[in-house]
Amino acid sequence: MARLKKKLVQWEPTDIKAELLTKYPPKVARKRAKQIMINEALENTTPEIVANVRTIPGIITMRGCTYAGCKGVIMGPTSDIVNLVHGPIGCSFYAWLTRRNQTSASGEKNENFIPYAMSTDMQDSDIIFGGEKKLEAAIQEAYDLFHPKGIAVFATCPVGLIGDDIHAVARKMKEKFGNCNVFAFSCEGYKGVSQSAGHHIANNQVFRHMVGTSTTEKTDKYKINLLGEYNIGGDGFEIDRILKKCGITNIATFSGNSTYDQFASANQADLSAVMCHRSINYVADMLEVKYGIPWIKINFIGANSTAKSLRKIAKYFGDQELIDRVEEVIAEEMPAVEVARADVLPRTEGKTAMIFVGGSRAHHYQELFKEMGMKTISAGYEFGHRDDYEGRQVIPTLKVDADSRNIEELEVEPDEKLFRPRKSPEEMQALEKDGLHFKEYHGLNPDMDKDTIIIDDMNQYEADKLIQIMKPDLFCAGIKEKYSVQKLGIPQKQLHSYDSGGPYAGFVGAVNFYHEIDRLVNSRVWSYMKAPWQENPELSATYVWE
Amino acid sequence: MLLRHTPKEIMERNALVINPAKTCQPIGAMYASLGINGCLPHSHGSQGCCAYHRSTLTRHYKEPISAATSSFTEGASVFGGQANLLQAIENIFTVYEPEIIAIHTTCLSETIGDDLKQIAIKAEKEGKIPKGKHIIGAPTPSYVGSHVTGFSNMVKAMAGMATPTGKKNGKVNIIPGWVEPSDMRELKRLAEMIGVDYTLFPDTSGVLDGPLSGEYTMFPKGGTTVQELKGCGDAIGTLALGEWCSADAARWLDSKCKVPCSVLDMPFGLKATDRFIDALRIVAGTTVPDEVTYERGQLVDLISDMHQYFYHKRVALVGDPDQLISMVEFLTSIDMIPAYVITGTPGKKFEARIKELTKDVPCEVKVKAWGDMFLLHQWIKNEPVDLLIGNTYCKYIARDEDIPLVRWGFPILDRQGHQYFPTVGYKGALRLLEKILSALLDRKDRDDPERTFELVM
Ligand code: SF4
Ligand code: SF4
């Protein structure tokens, strides 16, 4: 501990930053310098960080591609829509069951297509002569075999290049079937600069092809949509449990444990609660413009944040009955959380963590660490944008570069039939005045301490350096980063797929997380790095044989 | 039911692959590259492929897998990826300092038509390759063949580093094919026991089976060195294990460097190991020591001790051609019945070879190249089997149909041991039999009625 303190004192944040950059060729160093920021946590402004820009060729990035964001993240968790990947076999293979998004297969007929990887397995002749015929045949075969409600077609890199018109094929097949919605995603991996573009492409199509198409009316009293929750490790199950207990109906989760019908009915909710701001804030906006559903930012990661989020939702609906029920639920759930927290606190307090994941979790999980008395000394997003760091107020100033320009922005207008304002402007204003802020997200930076280091699109080289300098007790990232960190004797927790275990959302999730982190940072294994003869190489004592 | 939509009735499919029994070329190339000492694999395409391949290899090995990517954007996809690759080469040599970069292409760069050779020449000319450092490249379009093809292509590129001096160095090249680090270690142990001076390439032992010691280095000590690869053109002969994985490289050395080769099956099981040991002894002109013969005897002993449990048990197998060929031969040799054999890798030759190996099996053997696990599952639904052998994805079938599963192949994402305990050679065959027996007998213990429950087996 003493040694660690000394280390931290020795290194000024500016020196750390300089050290991260020294070995880079000048061009790379210049670019990375703008993506590494020493947090100042000023009252009203934070310095600008560069984010959502191209990855540098050759620099080992944590990022994946647009296809991964579209098919893997957004559409992957949906149980009753057939996901058909148009491309050579690999893209489909790698996205097969690897993300730990759980499902209860709650569709009408309990359909569950998640365990199936489907691909057109393009061959060289398809690349040369075009793959539309094959795609058409594959859609037909999928339809004949499964008779699903929907078939989603995903383009991989070569498809865009050879010019297959997947949307035309989808349209044709949809018309032909009559009872199966076929739609396509132009999510070629080279588009955009990260998974983030894929989220956008996916969400646009979900919005365009499914939302608002249900004819069954939802009559529950407190209806919300939960946006940007992917049910990794069962997070969504826990959130749904809590919502249900409070008497709140979750019409549609985008997209954890989702079904076709949920998406189709999303227009009927009265509030959108946004979990992962990055992957979905634009859908919340579109739901508001087209159907009149206001949105708020919530966070179910961390017991306190969960309680806070529930109170926000209750405040929005404004019924005393609901407000009371929410308080009851919180009062019921918190004791178990407090017991677990008190149990781990003596072992976790004062420990440090670094988090480099996604577009929201690097922010959300700091709440859980705070509850355990742990400090996040460095963090950043893999595919966040500036607003995820600095807050939504920067959105009007964001530059649209060549890479973002290619990602479609849907133009939406109020729906003639389905638009319905949920609150009057006066009611909205009153709520705002009462502290319930709509369309607001202040980003990660203001929540981090002064002099913490914020790094966008962190790469393996910087991670290794940072760990060696700052010696955190825990590093959080993805599977690719896991073992190089652990080889250094520092535990790594995956915060994309969680390695194993979960849920970590909600009250039960908080308890799980406390125990998991306690287990990780205090595991005995980290004391076995060196053999006795390595720790003590001199033959100082002679062995006595009696 | 996890695979609740898989019907028993088999409908012929011509366009749709469901639950593939293969993946794409680059991941094989990446795995092979990791078997070169001091090598950073590089994926020339957009960054998603590289992320996926690294993730899959990481989940299989529970080890760090470093690889870089050209991170194509839309612009690169239109104008070609040359600028990205040149920049990547410079960044990699500056920041990570590998001895060698092994570049493979992806569907994207292949479709665009990027020419690795020409880009490499340009990099050389522009001084982007520091003195004494190397780059090699292999084309790996995923719309041809499978991950096995990609592995083979990269191994061929490794052979391409041979710079014959005209003087034989007395060594034997052993090309192990896509086997585990543990298997590569075992092949080296056997070669050493027989007294063969060898170059094994690729060699992922010492790279992907590393210790936890509080230190991390991107380039562990293991792997075939560049020096050794340069010398493989001076070898007295090459033993290529596996027609699909290793033959191309061996034949290239044969025709270009006059290193005679023989292509053997991968040494899984009794007979294939016999042929491997025999070939080693002949090419190196040594005698097989008693210890090796002793190990062989132990294997034969176990087969005879437990034959009653193997006899006529029906097995479904899914995996890669070279592995399956040897495994089918092994199972047949102990009187098990390889009832269904599926690989996702295309090739009529494969089907012919399996047919030939199983011609005396007393019932129909179904085999399909370019098949998928959906079809395998349907076959099983129509006539069940006693045992399933394949990668982790088989566990969905195994659970639904309540069939014991032996995990063997790639990828194994949910169990450990493959990187530490070999399945090649006689010792490896012992381990395979141990696994098969445990699976069958655990099942028997679970299912036997109390009346007939056995203590001694
Ligand atoms: S596009 Fe990439 S991941 Fe997909 S099959 Fe080709 S090389 Fe593999
Ligand atoms: S080919 Fe494109 S879509 Fe497929 S994994 Fe690679 S980058 Fe992603």
Image (cartoon, coloured by chain):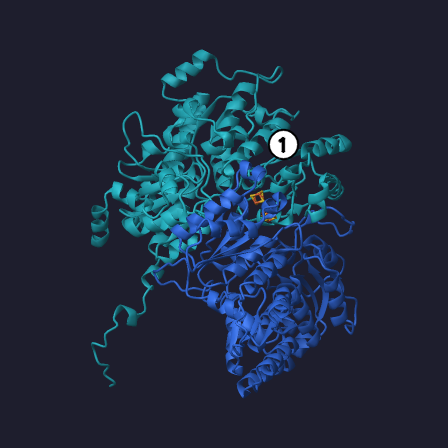
Query: What color is chain B drawn in?
Result: blue
Q: Residue at x 43, y 32 (%)?
A: A385
- Residue type, mark 1 in image: Asp
Question: What x and y, as percent, mark residue B92?
Answer: 43, 51
**Along the line of sight, the residue nearer the viewer: B71 or A105:** B71
Horizontal and vertical percent position of residue B299: 60, 80
> Where the C terminus of chain A falls, by quadrant?
bottom left
Question: At 72% from the left edge and 34% from the top edge, which residue is drawn?
Answer: A169
Q: Chain letter for cyan? A: A
As rendered, which of B198 and B393 lies closer to the eye? B198
Left or right: B42 with respect to B405? left
From the top left corner, tell me how far across and down residue B87 is, in percent.
46, 45
| Residue B388, horizontal then vertical, whole percent | 65, 63
Residue under label 1: A261
> Label 1 marks which chain's residue?
A
Q: Is residue B71 visible?
A: no
